[in-house]
């Protein structure tokens, strides 16, 4: 009996280890649907192959917002959700029918959260499409579920290359049909950072740290691949756990290779600890720090230790760009946003989410017809419309969707952060621009 | 005789729905030695616990120095001179011998009095003094019995309750043990003893009670109890004991 | 005395064989990792390193010392938290899983106080020391209050029920406190103000000659010093004072303790209070070292501290501290000194795994923990 207890306790402890080691589960993309063509003869897109949704008179067209709205990453998800809300309001009715987003859902910025939310979404057969997720990690679990249900999902801030393609015509490991995004693909962001570090700054050795999340892993890999291709040497590639606070071990591991540049495209709070502790590790005294859009947030920029770090991120100089479906431009959007929320957006993907929503509503308009007092929406038609988007003008610029759902403008800028007390000056301090 | 220190007046106790003590009356007078006899499950332990306030009676009165103390905690009674040497001694095994003795005086504030009492106990049990810094759990059974008595004496008791003092002791030690009890008694401390070894207990005691299924069936002087044929039969080993 | 006769069969069961194998594998892996590390330090291009880890670079002495210092300071904080787990376990025999939240509350108190003081210009220069002391005292008070309240509201009504019930309750208490803090402060990370220059500066110690010279950041030194003093203070309290003796007596036998006149309830409250104070101090140290707190800050350090308490032998205070320090050090050193030479990718990400593997190893080799005593039924008889 005692032996048994001992064995059980060992097994229990082993399972703790296993839980600590395991990566977030990824679901493989099922793709049993084919995009439809034709069907245009009835005056609407779609061939009915994914079924139709009937909205009864007086009812509303159902779409959903699925973003990280609580926890550490709420800074990213909240502006996304508000972008969706504003786009619905600006767009107005479709053929006399209201659009309803329901309650904003939470992807918890994790595969588990994405999966749970997606399951609740697909349980409601009235839903046409989802704007989200905020985090690539959540999308890997949510996208296949939503795609298999015949719905579409358009993300304003997923950037992991695994979710779409390698830009050479090969689908990424987590790609599933029905998935689109207006955010950039991190292959471009990684390439932009590598070019800046190697060509502009002339640094030839670099290391990268990710946190196991598909977004950070994808971006760190994109950077190191591009850096090696340019002729640089990668001296270290490591990972932290999201909850880690003591970064000295991982920084020591990186310091062993004495890199000139360290790229850590991760999130707060882990990013805070890296910036804070890098000075205390012997061997990293002269290493320059580079981060990405995950840390390009006010909460991080306000920390004194973030001064001097350069950040890559989407080009957010939207200027007078106008969304062609609603006629709203960035300045008008921001005015409404600040009036409604009492603050400026805490992350840059509100425009991407806004354009994504307007595109989805256009697609619904194009794939629907009225049947008596009811509105009938053809699910296949929605995809057909999105697949065919070319030259759409949005707040973020010109949008073209490729065969794997990448629709973003792919413009990247790199800024150098000068002062933790003047964030606007730092954000305007663009050192490098990149467009494919 | 003076007023009793501790008294039970028509005490009834229950454990859940089970009626344990039934209308029990007891009285312990200063300086006397009394013993409580009874078989297993007769309610002996409950009697002790009720005297100390670890069990609250459902009816009746526990009276200490004329005051009803039914609702008072154990510490209240210990402060007023009631304490116990528990069955199997129950020392704090992971604490040192000295700490065990000091805990006996937990409620006392008179540093000098504590010191002189310690000295008194060292005189009484010289072997305890040799082992002061050892953990109590490492002592032999006889030594533990000495520490347990010393610990109880450190509370400066007027009434010392003893729960089965010879239980678990080697036969050779039982005699010594009763001599120690006698010695304590001679210092003027009243002893209330619960004991299976009725022969030995009654030969020392002034009076005794016999408890049967929670009821006092005999209440007499030790001599007449020793002479009682029924008692001899059931407790004093004439018929082989139990 | 009743002595249970133990049937000590010489036959080995399957379970025995499995455990022996596991022991052998773990110790073997550690040995191979260490040898590989030493070899890599001497010659980074040795055949083993070329096979397992072609990019291997040796660590400099400075870097290894840096790892040791960071591990020790992290471990000291685990140890301080572990004390609370261990004391409550000792007295009540259940694991108070909400203890990590007590630590978190201490860190949050520090966040509020330190920022207020920084706004008043008292978080720099010479004013820093009294400010830190004030913050620490306040944090210890709040943490103590929280721990005491927790005992009164959540655990005392359950006294006497099976151990599983307060255990589950403590998980509920933990969720409650976390969410209350989210409600009060929001879900995001909260920052401490920057520490003054003179504290951040590295200090050099070369008492044992140049080869053993250590450079320690002032902050980590502060953590180590405060943790040592707190531990010494607690040791004095538990071993030398009357209340401490009462605590140990209650831990061993509540009934007899009350027979001594000890107020058992009060002593249990004291136990929670002292454990809470230690966690509060750990919270402040955490805040000074990492300068960031979040509502979930208590979770992982809490679990680690619990692990440390078990590694050290639950119920044993010295063991809790030793367990904490060894756990922190193992976490800092093992990834780079054992896992990396074996070719594990991203080894520092596995620090949690290292912590729990250490737990398994200790349980396999010494099931009572490093300093634990076996409390069997015959011990009680």
Image: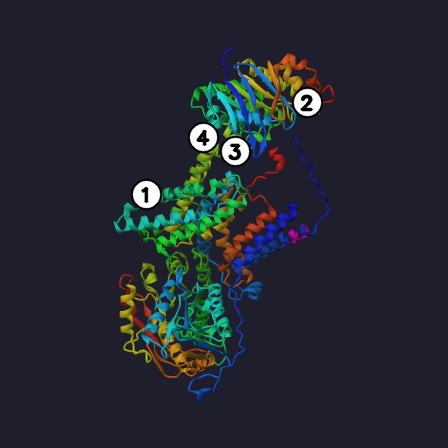
Magenta residues span C16-21
Chain name for mark 2: B
| Tag 2 near tag 3, CB within 8 Å | no
- From the viewer's perspective, is residue A82 above or below residue B117? below
User: In the image, residue C111 lies at what x, y percent?
Assistant: 34, 51
Q: Mark 4 or 3 closer to N-term? A: 4
The residue singled out by tag 2 in the image is B171
Horizontal and vertical percent for residue C171?
Answer: 48, 49
Q: Residue furthest front?
A: A372
Nearest the viewer among A101 and A216 is A101
Q: How many marks?
A: 4
- Would you place residue A370 above or below residue A285 in this image? below
Q: Nearer the viewer, mark 2 or mark 1?
A: 2
Q: Which mark is residue B45?
A: none
What label does residue C134 carry, if any?
1
Which is in the foreground here, disc 4 or disc 3?
A: 3
Q: Nearer the viewer, residue B217 or B172?
A: B217
Mark 2 neighbour class, 10 Å CA radius: few under 14, some 14 to 19, many 20 or more: few
Q: Which secondary structure lies at badge 4?
A: helix
How far, Cα to Cα, is label 1 from label 4?
28 Å
Q: Chain of mark 1?
A: C
Spatial separation of the CA atoms under disc 2 and disc 3: 30 Å
Which element type, helix, strand or loop, lies under badge 1? helix
Q: CA distance from mark 2 to mark 1?
A: 63 Å
Query: Which residue is at the front of the view, A16 or A244?
Result: A16
- Chain on which label 3 sits: C
Q: CA distance from mark 4 to mark 2?
A: 37 Å
Can residue B47 be found in the magenta stretch?
Answer: no
Q: State which tag comes first along the sequence, 1 or 4.
A: 1
The label on residue C242 is 4
């Amino acid at each position: 009996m005692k032996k048994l207890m001992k064995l059980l306790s060992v097994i229990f402890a082993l399972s703790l280890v296993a839980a600590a080691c395991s990566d977030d589960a990824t679901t493989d993309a099922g793709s049993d649907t084919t995009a439809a063509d034709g069907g245009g003869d009835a005056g609407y897109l779609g061939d009915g192959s994914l079924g139709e949704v009937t909205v009864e008179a007086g009812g509303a067209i159902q779409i959903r917002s699925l973003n990280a709205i609580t926890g550490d990453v709420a800074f990213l998800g909240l502006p996304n959700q508000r972008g969706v809300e504003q786009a619905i309001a600006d767009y107005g009715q479709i053929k006399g029918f209201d659009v309803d987003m329901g309650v904003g859902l939470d992807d918890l910025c994790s595969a588990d959260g994405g999966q749970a939310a997606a399951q609740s979404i697909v349980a409601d057969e009235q839903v046409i499409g989802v704007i989200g997720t905020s985090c690539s990690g959540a999308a890997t679990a949510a996208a296949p579920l939503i795609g298999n249900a015949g719905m579409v999902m358009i993300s304003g801030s997923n950037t992991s290359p695994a979710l779409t393609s390698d830009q050479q015509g090969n689908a990424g490991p987590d790609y599933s049909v029905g998935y689109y995004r207006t955010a950039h693909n991190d292959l471009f962001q990684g390439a932009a950072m590598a070019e800046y570090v190697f060509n502009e700054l002339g640094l030839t050795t670099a290391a990268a740290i990710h946190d196991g999340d598909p977004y950070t892993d994808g971006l760190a890999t994109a950077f190191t691949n591009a850096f090696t291709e340019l002729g640089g040497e990668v001296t270290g590639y490591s990972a932290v756990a999201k909850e880690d606070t003591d970064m000295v071990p991982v920084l020591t591991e990186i310091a062993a290779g004495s890199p000139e540049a360290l790229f850590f495209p991760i999130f707060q709070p882990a990013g805070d600890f890296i910036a804070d502790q890098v000075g205390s590790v012997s061997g990293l005294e002269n290493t320059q720090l580079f981060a990405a859009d995950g840390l390009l947030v006010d909460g991080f920029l306000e920390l004194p230790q973030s001064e001097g770090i350069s950040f890559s991120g989407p080009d957010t100089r939207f200027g007078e760009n106008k969304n062609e479906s609603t006629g709203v431009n960035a300045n008008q959007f921001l005015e409404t946003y600040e009036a409604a929320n009492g603050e400026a957006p805490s992350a840059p993907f509100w425009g991407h989410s806004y354009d994504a929503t307007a595109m989805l509503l256009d697609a619904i308009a194009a794939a629907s017809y009225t049947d008596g007092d009811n509105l009938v929406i053809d699910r296949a038609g929605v995809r057909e419309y999105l697949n065919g988007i070319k030259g759409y003008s949005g707040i973020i610029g010109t949008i073209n969707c490729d065969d794997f759902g990448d629709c973003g403008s792919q413009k990247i800028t790199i800024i150098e952060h000068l002062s933790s007390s003047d964030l606007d000056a730092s954000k305007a301090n663009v050192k490098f621009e990149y467009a494919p | 005789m003076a007023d009793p220190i501790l008294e039970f007046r028509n005490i009834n106790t229950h454990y859940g729905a089970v009626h344990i003590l039934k209308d029990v009356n007891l009285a312990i007078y200063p300086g006397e030695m009394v013993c409580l006899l009874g078989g297993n499950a007769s309610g002996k332990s409950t009697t002790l616990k009720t005297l100390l306030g670890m069990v609250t009676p459902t009816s009746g009165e526990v009276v200490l120095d004329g005051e009803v103390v039914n609702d008072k905690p154990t510490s209240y009674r210990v402060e007023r001179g009631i304490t116990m040497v528990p069955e199997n001694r129950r020392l704090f095994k992971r604490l040192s011998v000295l700490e065990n003795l000091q805990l006996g005086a937990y409620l006392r504030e008179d540093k000098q009095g504590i010191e002189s009492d310690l000295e008194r106990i060292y005189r009484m049990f010289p072997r305890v003094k040799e082992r002061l810094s050892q953990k109590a759990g490492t002592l032999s059974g006889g030594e533990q019995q000495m520490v347990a008595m010393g610990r109880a004496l450190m509370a400066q008791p007027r009434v010392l309750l003893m729960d089965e003092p010879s239980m678990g002791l080697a036969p050779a030690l039982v005699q010594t043990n009763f001599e120690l009890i006698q010695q304590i008694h001679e210092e003027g401390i009243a002893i209330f003893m619960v004991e299976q070894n009725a022969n030995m207990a009654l030969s020392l005691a002034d009076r005794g009670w016999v408890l049967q299924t929670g009821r006092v069936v005999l209440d007499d002087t030790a001599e007449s109890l020793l002479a009682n044929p029924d008692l001899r039969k059931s407790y004093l080993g004439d018929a082989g004991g139990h | 005395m009743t002595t249970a006769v133990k049937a000590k069969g010489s036959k080995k069961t399957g379970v025995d064989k499995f455990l022996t194998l596991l022991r052998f594998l773990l110790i073997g892996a550690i040995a191979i990792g260490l040898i590989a590390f030493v070899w890599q330090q001497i010659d980074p291009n040795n055949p083993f390193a070329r096979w397992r880890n072609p990019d291997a670079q040796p660590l400099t002495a400075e870097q290894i010392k840096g790892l040791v210092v960071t591990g020790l300071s992290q471990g000291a904080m685990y140890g301080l938290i572990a004390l609370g787990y261990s004391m409550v376990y000792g007295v009540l025999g259940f694991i108070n899983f909400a203890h990590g939240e007590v630590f978190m509350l201490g860190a949050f108190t520090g966040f509020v106080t330190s920022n207020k003081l920084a706004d008043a210009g008292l978080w720099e220069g010479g004013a820093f020391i009294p400010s830190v002391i004030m913050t620490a005292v306040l944090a210890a008070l709040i943490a103590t209050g929280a721990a005491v309240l927790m005992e009164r509201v959540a655990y005392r009504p359950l006294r006497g029920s099976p151990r599983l019930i307060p255990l589950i309750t403590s998980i509920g208490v933990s969720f409650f406190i976390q969410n209350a803090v989210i409600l009060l402060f929001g879900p995001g990370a909260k920052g401490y103000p920057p520490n003054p220059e003179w504290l951040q500066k590295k200090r050099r110690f070369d008492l044992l000659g140049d080869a053993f010279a250590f450079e320690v950041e002032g902050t980590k030194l502060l953590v180590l010093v405060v943790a040592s003093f707190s531990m010494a203070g607690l040791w004095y309290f538990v071993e030398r004072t009357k209340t401490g003796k009462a605590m140990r007596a209650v831990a061993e036998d509540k009934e007899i303790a009350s027979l001594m006149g000890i107020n058992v309830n009060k002593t249990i409250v004291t136990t929670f209070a002292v454990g809470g104070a230690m966690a509060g101090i750990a919270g402040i140290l955490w805040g000074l070292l990492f300068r960031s707190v979040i509502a979930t800050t208590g979770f992982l350090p809490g679990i680690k501290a619990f692990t440390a308490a078990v590694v050290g032998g639950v119920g044993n205070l010295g063991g809790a501290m030793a367990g904490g320090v060894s756990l922190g050090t193992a976490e800092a050193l093992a990834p780079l000194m054992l896992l990396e030479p074996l070719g594990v990718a991203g080894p520092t990400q596995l620090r949690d795994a290292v912590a729990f593997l250490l737990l398994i190893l200790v349980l396999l080799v010494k099931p009572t923990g490093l300093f634990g005593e076996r409390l069997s039924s015959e011990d009680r008889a």
